[in-house]
Amino acid sequence: MRYLEHRIPPPIVVAIAGSAMWVVASRPPLWPPPTTVHLAAGLILLVIGIAIALSAVHSFRRARTTVNPMKPETSTSLVSTGIFARSRNPMYLGMLFSLLAWAVYLASALAWLGPVAFALFITRFQIIPEERAMHALFGPAFSAYCQRVRRWL
């Protein structure tokens, strides 16, 4: 299974999950609120997700370290301030929020499998390998960071 580690860029994983959610959304809705409720709730979640992800990118840029999730070994600094004081993976958290927004908008019980599948896949094939690289690069400082800050929220 290590073959899949860092092989699929996270935005592609989001696109695959979102597409699959759209396909299964033809099933009966989880609840029948008006479309405007779906749209409003989805937009709120989407804005939150975008804000989280952009905040993380800004923190990485300010620290002058890579935002490339395919090559975590090229990181030059451990970012633990800003949004990274709340989540070790805010970019993935922002992506998860976008999938949650999509699930709310689709109002399909099966669509909720998309965010779950994304979180499981990203954790196994992206986050855990990234954490191995961070431990190798930053040792005790990264271990201490992991003790203070949760992986997702």
Image (cartoon, grey):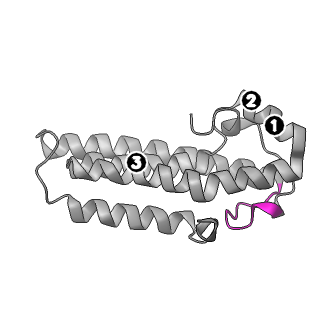
Q: Position of residue 3 (x, y in %)?
A: 62, 71
Whether residue 2 is in magenta: the answer is no
Q: Within 10 angstroms of label 1, few (less than 14), some, or many (20 or more) residues?
A: few
Name the chief secondary structure element in magenta. loop
Q: Quadrant of the N terminus?
A: bottom right
How far apart are the alpha carbons under marks 3 and 2?
24 Å
**Viewer-proximal residue among 35 and 134:** 134
**Viewer-proximal residue among 3 and 69:** 3
Residue numbers of the magenta segment = 64-73
Q: Are marks 3 and 2 in contact (CB under 8 Å)?
A: no
Q: Position of residue 8 (x, y in %)?
A: 56, 70
Check the image and report above or below for 81 versus 131: above
- The label on residue 147 is 2
Q: Amino acid at mark 3?
A: Val
Q: Secondary structure at mark 1?
A: helix
Q: Within 10 angstroms of label 3, few (less than 14), some, or many (20 or more) residues?
A: some
Residue in the image at 21% along x and 46% along y: 109
55 left or right, relative to 146: left
3 or 1: tag closer to the N-terminus: 3
Q: Are marks 2 and 1 in contact (CB under 8 Å)?
A: yes
How far apart are the alpha carbons under marks 2 and 1?
6 Å
Q: Quadrant of the C terminus?
A: top right
Q: Amino acid at mark 2?
A: Gln
List the residue tagged with mark 3: 116
Q: Amino acid at mark 1?
A: Ser
Whether residue 66 is in magenta: the answer is yes
